[in-house]
Image (cartoon, rainbow, N blue to C red):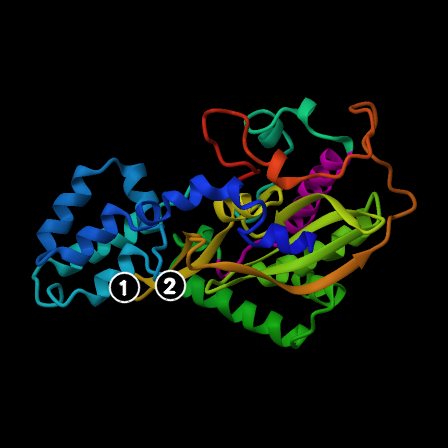
Amino acid sequence: MFLRRILTNKYKGAHFSSLNANINNKYHTPFHAVINTSTNVDQVLKFMRSQPVNTLAEMAKTTNDQGELPIDLFFSNAHFPNDPCVSTLYDNMIHVTQNHTIQDVTESISIDDITNSCYPVSNLSAGLYDNLLTGISIVNDVRAVIDTSASHPCINSLSKKEKSEIHSRLKNLRNWYDNSEDPEVIFEACKTFTMGNCHELSFAAIHFLKEKAKSDLSAHVIQIKNGDHTFIIFGSKREDKLENVVYVDAWSGVVGIASFENLMTNIGTFRRFYDSDDSFINIIAKLNPNYHSFYVREDFEIQKVQNSVATLGLFQKDNTTFEPSLALTNPDSSNKPFGVSR
């Protein structure tokens, strides 16, 4: 029941009323609208030139209620194919859609990204802080054994030949673990081939979680319905309750406190398009709660590692069960996403 509350937007419905009230305007952007209604390419190019770069990039990665990015609508506009400027528009749309701030898949992350900009340490319970630290450590451990990912935007600048070679490595990796869903087997595959996509890196994260658990944990591999991405969430078990629940996305380098709202804000979904040279471009599209949803792929019960020690000297321990609906809203009025985003 607790897990279902995190993975759906029905948990304490009033908490999400403001989100749902603006949902149609938020996800059907002006960029979607201009692509839908334009009768020639120049109208779209003029609109794109009128927008701030960051605003345009955000709209370009926004999924509407039909699961479409603006670039998807480009292909369905019957006026565009015969326009002499169509290739210019497509190149511009590819460029803005792949405009990511995400860092390389091998880069490490830090607790400072949470405590300095998103959530004060003093507001976190000891158990929650420990689980966040564990999640960050897991991301860094996973990233230390790989040097690339076939689906990550960090390879977009590589040549077509280099991308093809990475895809060959991915095929060999997947042949090696042969559809196994054993975290140990998949971790060995990632280590052997020094790579992995989000699916492999999530199971590798479970491998490291088993080595670092500071309490008995319940962990879950999560996937996105109507999307393409995998990550994990885990929380500490106390009697029949799950508390201090965090999400860990080793592929994108995102760690934070788990709630439906935070997952929808900070987790993305993989999309792929091809540029004018027929070289693929990896894109992380934003999730839309009217179109996407989360489901559990695998469950793991993990026992506390005996020599694992909780963080010392930071908090007075308490027995309060963590309630995501109360604690997940960013108290900072700057509206920064809650989590470690890399």
The answer to if 91 sits in the magenta stretch is: no
Residue for badge 1: 277
Q: Nearer the viewer, residue 24 or 315?
A: 24
The answer to if 130 sits in the magenta stretch is: yes
Query: Which kind of residue does numbered mark 2 sit on?
Result: Lys
- Residue 113's tag is none
Instruction: Give how far across and how far down residue 30 sits, in percent.
Output: 23, 46
- Residue shown at the point (8%, 57%) measured from the top left: 40
- Residue shown at the point (27%, 63%) measured from the top left: 277
Name the magenta segment's main secondary structure.
helix
Q: Is residue 260 above or below residue 273?
A: above
Instruction: Give how far across and how far down residue 133 sits, in percent.
Output: 71, 37
Mark 2 to mark 1 CA distance (whole Å): 9 Å
Q: Assign a secondary structure to mark 2.
A: helix
- Residue shown at the point (14%, 48%) measured from the top left: 45
Quadrant for residue 113, please give it: top right
Q: Are marks 2 and 1 in contact (CB under 8 Å)?
A: yes
